[in-house]
Each structure stands twice: as structure tokens, then as C-alpha cells.
Image: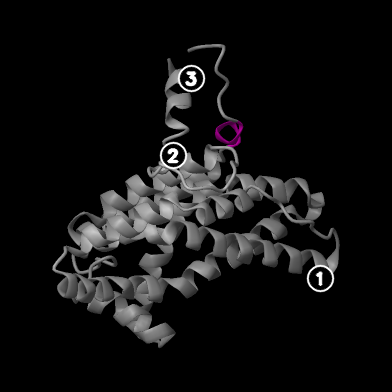
Amino acid sequence: MSPHVPLPTPLRQASPVLLFASLCCWLLLAAGSEGLPSVALCSPSPTLVTAGAAFSTIYGLSATAMLAALFWILMVAAMTAPQLAQPISQLRLRSLVQRRGRSAGLFAAAYLLVWIAVGPILLAVPNAMTVLAQATALPAFVIAVAIAVLWQAAPLRQGMLNRCHRVPNLSAFGAAADRDCIRFGLTHGLLCTAICAPAMLLPLTAPAFHLPLMFALSVALQLERLAPPRPPRWTWRILPGQAVVPVLFRWIR
């Protein structure tokens, strides 16, 4: 191990609790996919009635919709939990000792609420991609790759990534502190969905490999968060985390 290449600070701050929670969610998803072959949330075919008909057309209650929503929450938790180590760590540092658990809980609940709201829309995208593929005579996966690459290179996306490294001013007491934690969670959730959603089109349009692709994407996006902010401009770094991987390899060596 080279003493001259320090391990990136965000990696040193990785939360074992969040990593363990993510691993548990991945295991549950894998077990669910094995035990319930119809639970293929990312499939555009009528499996699990197309993810509970996209949560029964925005949150209509049914057993299928509830099961689809549960698996969607597991998927979100599996993919994003490790990425929350840095904002939650900063949140705890800026909160009074007796409020740290409450602040982290409110932040996480607000963050997850954004993904639950976006879930039905994102799960309905494969059907639209299929229609577009038929109109253009291109495979839906190829269209998804083009969209993801274009967004990955865009300066607007880098600007959003930079904002993920910022922590807003947080009140210390009472309802104002709760409000600020919720607002922080909602803002961070909106940024994460905007950053990640186009890349998630890849597993969403490849249902036969959606779980392995989701896992690979989760690792890549986590590595991307280790990179420091940089000026928003068009870039050829179209693979998430590619700027950090050489640093990690040098550290391992």
C-alpha cells in the first residue's frame, strides 16, 4: 500500500451502518427475484402487472401496487444508502447531540419520499422507450445509452453533483430545525433523482439483467460521489466514477 496516495476523505467517512443496510437490501432483492420471478420491477413486460401498473397509476391502493412499492423502496435503499454517508455525517455534526438521530431520520424520510414520488414515473419510462424504439427502429437499450451518455457529459449534471457536496444552513432548535432537515432531505433527493435517473434507464430497458446492472450502476455512482467538485462544463468523462478509480487503484497498490 502506497503511503503517498491518501485514501479519499469521503471513502474514509463511509458509514458501515449504511453499507450494511445497502447489502441487506441487495440480498433481499436478490432473494425476491429468485423466489418471485414475476417481481421484475424494471421490466417493461407485464410482470408484477408492470410494477403494480406503476404503483396503481400513482398510489392507488392494491396488493400488487404495495408489493411493487416495497421492492422499489428496497431498490432505492440498496442503491443510494452508501451515498448518504457524507450528508448525514455533516447533518449530525451540525445538530445538537440530543437531536442527531431525529435530524438524520427526518432527512432520510424526506429523501426517500422524493424517490417514492418519482418511482411510478420512472417505472413507466420503459413503455415509452419501447414506443420510441419502434418509431425509430432502434433498440430501446441503445436509446437509453445515448440519453445517459449525453446527460453524463452535460455541465448541468456536474453542477448538480457540486451541489450535493454542499450542506445548507441548519437551525439548531425546535420546528425550524425539523423543517431545515426535511428541506435538506427533499433537496438532496431531487438532486439525486435528477443526477441518476437517466443512467437508470439502462437497467430499466434491459430487464433480463436489471439487477446486476443496477448493482454495477450503484457502485459507479458511489465512486462518482468520491470525486471533488469541478467546474460545470462538457466532459468526456461519461463513465460514473472513472476519475476516482485510478486513485483507488494507486492507493490499493
Measured Cα–Cα span from mark 1 to mark 3: 44 Å
Q: How many numbered dots are placed on residues in this image?
A: 3
Residue 38 place in picture, x, y as percent: 20, 69
Name the residue: 42% across, 56% down: 151
Residue 163 place in picture, x, y as percent: 63, 53
Tag 3: amino acid: Trp
Vertical placement of residue 135 versus 225, above or below: below
Q: Which portion, as a residue range, is magenta? A: 9-13
Q: Is 77 left or right of 27, judged from the image as shown?
A: right
| Mark before the other along the chain sequence, 3 or 2 | 2
Residue behind mark 1: 175
Residue behind mark 3: 251
Quarter placement of the C terminus: top left
Crowding at label 2, few (<14), some or many (≥20) Cα neighbours within 10 Å? some
Residue behind mark 2: 241
Measured Cα–Cα span from mark 2 to mark 1: 38 Å
